[in-house]
Image (cartoon, helix red, strand yellow):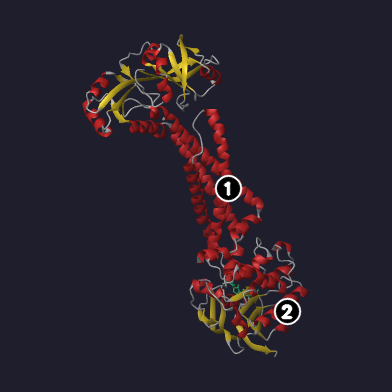
């Protein structure tokens, strides 16, 4: 109550000071907003990177995934022997163990007739392999030879081809001098690693890669009987299977993919660096603004001290300014990225969008930063000594 | 927050001593650079008196005034303001002591981002339990008394030197302090406005019954003083001119 009352009585000195010099205020706000935008863009792209590159991984219909120990990520999986699937089926708790074939392939864009690289996923169409209802409803289509399903969210000029398929007219294209038919569509979205994905039957897949043996598979998708504990079954698989295959739970597999992009690829580092840079730019700008302001008012602050205002009061003024700058700068700083995200999402077909948690995170960071800059700037307040001033 | 009963000021009796200085020495610098600037100062000022302090440049007038105002801490001797000993006082006690008086500087020292009214209000905010509306009203009245009723919302940059100094006086007096300390308040002003400002201080002080200790070089305003003290080489001369 008392605090609230004294707050109401208080002259909003920080705000009045900032407002008095509009030019400086605008420049300061522009700087802070710029740093906010920079940070939002970095975080947005970073998140899109992790999100998009684990999209296929997350869509797999499996409790446990077998992968070659040489695998780096979804684009570089290497292969292992199909016999491991048979062995896996012996483990109690395992219901099914199916092969998934994955490879990049160069095809002719059916619309532009230009070559492009896409990712093709092959599996036995008798059973669903993905948690994608659209794919699972069209399994009959890909049972036909050389018929594939195509990703609506693909990056590149596919709009006309997609529209044609949607009208029920299959589109054909050419891959390795063989004709492929796009029989249907599903929605998944592009990733940093692949512009588009195709779903095909294992037979179609193997026909496209004649040198590849059916016995060397990319991934093993294991589904468990209901009630089986994935950790326990995974442990049993690990001890039962030889070392030429790695056993990961579905969650571990997504982490494995994300980890590659976070640590092994330079991309994660670059985004981390960018975010740090934005943070530093921010601190420098806000510190600069606040310390210039303290310097400009040092005589006035000394006068207030001579009148009996204490250091705490002046600290309050500097922090008041810091918070006002943070909040006012944040308004354009959060609005602009929302627009930019939409542009970027269109241009890259990546899942870039504003999330509430990111807004809160950046707001918290902004406030933290303004507090930090404020704390550094207030050291100058000590020199506001009324005795030496007059 | 420190509270002063504003009504009590006018009841201060002439016999009370409000400033009591005894054997005050003051030194600047440390070790080999240590230099004494005040020597054995003794001075006692009664409530309601107007004291003018003159003396050559560098004699220590400002030093004594800042000590009395609690702007720097007294080192040796005794310095009692309204009964409170400031010699050896803590930083916190000094801050509290500063709230007891109005200090008028040679320069106006107004805050450039605040209007005249807001500047005056700053002199009130620390002192009382007044509501925002009451603070506003009191500040406005004070500005009207110094003849700036039509300049309430002007920023210092838009006021003349004399007007600024009058705002500074309003800021120092708005909380009706028992003591006003003024360091060459007319130095930056021309003859006419200097005289006006001092007379204004005199009138207001008499109304509020407050004590004024003013440093000045300006011979033309000596007549408003009840008593004049003379400082030379850090010593107060005994010669005191009683005018009443
Ligand atoms: N902060 C300081 N550090 C060291 N010496 C100081 C300091 N302030 C003042 N002095 C010295 O103390 C002496 C008294 O200074 P003071 O400012 O009190 O004089 P004054 O009587 O007010 O002079 P003036 O009439 O010019 O204002 C001077 O010799 C000055 O050089
Ligand atoms: Mg002086």
Given residues A326 and A250, the one toward you in this image is: A250
Q: Are marks 2 and 1 on the same chain?
A: no
Give x and y (percent) for residue A105.
44, 17
Q: Residue furthest top?
A: A177
| Residue that appears at 54% across and 16% down | A111
Residue B173 sits above or below residue A20 on the image = below
Give x and y (percent) for residue A71.
34, 25
Check disc 1 and report the residue beneath it.
A329
SS category of the residue bearing label 1: helix
Name the image quarter holding the C terminus of chain A: bottom right
Determine the CA span between mark 2 and mark 1: 49 Å
| Residue that appears at 38% across and 23% down | A76
Give x and y (percent) for residue A304.
59, 67
Residue B66 sits above or below residue A253 on the image = below
| Residue that appears at 55% across and 63% down | A7
Q: Residues within 10 Å of mark 2 (few under 14, many from 20)?
A: some
Given residues A166 and A92, the one toward you in this image is: A166
Residue A87 sits above or below residue B164 on the image = above
Which chain contains the residue that carries disc 2?
Answer: B
Give x and y (percent) for residue A381.
54, 61
Q: Residues within 10 Å of mark 1 (few under 14, many from 20)?
A: many
Check disc 2 and report the residue beneath it.
B199
Quarter of the view holding residue A254: top left
SS category of the residue bearing label 2: helix
| Residue that appears at 59% across and 62% down | A298
């Amino acid at each position: 109550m008392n605090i609230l009352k004294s707050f109401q009585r208080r002259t909003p000195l920080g705000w009045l000071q900032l407002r008095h010099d509009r030019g400086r205020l605008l420049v300061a706000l522009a700087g802070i907003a710029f740093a906010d935008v920079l940070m939002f863009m970095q975080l947005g792209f970073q998140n899109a990177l992790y999100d998009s590159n684990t999209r296929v991984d997350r869509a797999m219909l499996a409790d446990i995934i077998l992968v070659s120990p040489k695998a780096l990520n979804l684009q570089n999986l290497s292969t292992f022997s199909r016999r491991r699937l048979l062995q896996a089926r012996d483990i109690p708790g395992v219901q099914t163990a199916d092969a998934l074939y994955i490879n990049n392939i160069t095809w002719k864009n059916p619309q532009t007739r230009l070559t492009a690289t896409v990712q093709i996923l092959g599996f036995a169409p008798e059973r669903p392999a993905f948690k994608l209802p659209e794919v699972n409803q069209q399994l009959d289509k890909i049972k036909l030879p050389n018929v594939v399903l195509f990703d609506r969210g693909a990056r590149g000029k596919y709009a006309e081809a997609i529209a044609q398929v949607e009208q029920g007219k299959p589109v054909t294209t050419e891959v390795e001098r063989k004709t492929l038919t796009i029989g249907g569509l599903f929605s998944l979205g592009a990733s940093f690693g692949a512009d588009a994905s195709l779903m095909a039957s294992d037979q179609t897949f193997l026909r496209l890669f004649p040198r590849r043996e059916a016995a060397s598979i990319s991934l093993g998708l294991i589904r468990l009987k209901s009630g089986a504990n994935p950790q326990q079954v995974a442990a049993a698989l690990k001890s039962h299977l030889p070392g030429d295959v790695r056993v990961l739970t579905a969650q571990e597999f997504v982490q494995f993919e994300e980890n590659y992009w976070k640590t092994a690829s330079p991309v994660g580092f670059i985004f981390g660096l960018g975010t740090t840079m934005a943070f530093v730019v921010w601190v420098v700008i806000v510190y600069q603004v606040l310390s210039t302001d303290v310097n400009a008012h040092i005589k006035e602050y000394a006068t207030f001290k001579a009148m009996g205002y204490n250091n705490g009061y002046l600290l309050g003024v500097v922090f008041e300014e810091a918070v006002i700058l943070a909040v006012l700068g944040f308004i354009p700083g959060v609005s602009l990225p929302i627009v930019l995200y939409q542009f970027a999402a269109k241009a890259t077909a990546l899942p870039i969008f504003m999330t509430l948690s990111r807004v809160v995170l950046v707001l918290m960071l902004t406030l933290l930063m303004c507090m930090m800059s404020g704390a550094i700037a207030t050291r100058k307040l000590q020199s506001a000594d009324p005795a030496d001033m007059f | 927050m420190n509270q002063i009963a504003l009504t009590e000021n006018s009841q201060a009796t002439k016999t009370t001593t409000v400033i009591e200085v005894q054997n005050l020495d003051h030194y600047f610098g440390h070790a080999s650079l240590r230099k004494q600037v005040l020597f054995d100062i003794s001075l006692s000022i009664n409530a309601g008196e107007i004291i003018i302090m003159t003396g050559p440049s560098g004699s220590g007038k400002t030093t004594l005034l800042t000590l009395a105002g609690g702007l720097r801490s007294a080192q040796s001797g005794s310095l009692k303001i309204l009964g409170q000993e400031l010699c050896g006082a803590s930083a916190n006690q000094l801050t509290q002591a500063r709230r007891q008086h109005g200090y008028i500087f040679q320069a106006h020292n107004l805050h450039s981002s605040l209007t005249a009214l807001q500047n005056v209000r700053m002199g009130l905010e620390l002192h009382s339990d007044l509501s925002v509306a009451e603070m506003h009203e009191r500040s406005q009245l004070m500005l009207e008394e110094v003849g700036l009723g039509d300049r309430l919302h002007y920023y210092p940059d838009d006021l003349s030197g004399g007007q600024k100094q009058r705002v500074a006086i309003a800021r120092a007096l708005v909380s009706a302090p028992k003591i006003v300390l003024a360091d060459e308040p007319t130095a930056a002003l021309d003859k006419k406005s200097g005289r006006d400002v001092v007379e204004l201080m005199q009138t207001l002080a008499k109304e509020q019954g407050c004590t004024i200790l003013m440093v000045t070089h300006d011979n033309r305003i000596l007549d408003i003083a009840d008593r004049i003290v003379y400082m030379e080489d850090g010593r107060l001369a005994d010669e005191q001119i009683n005018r009443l």
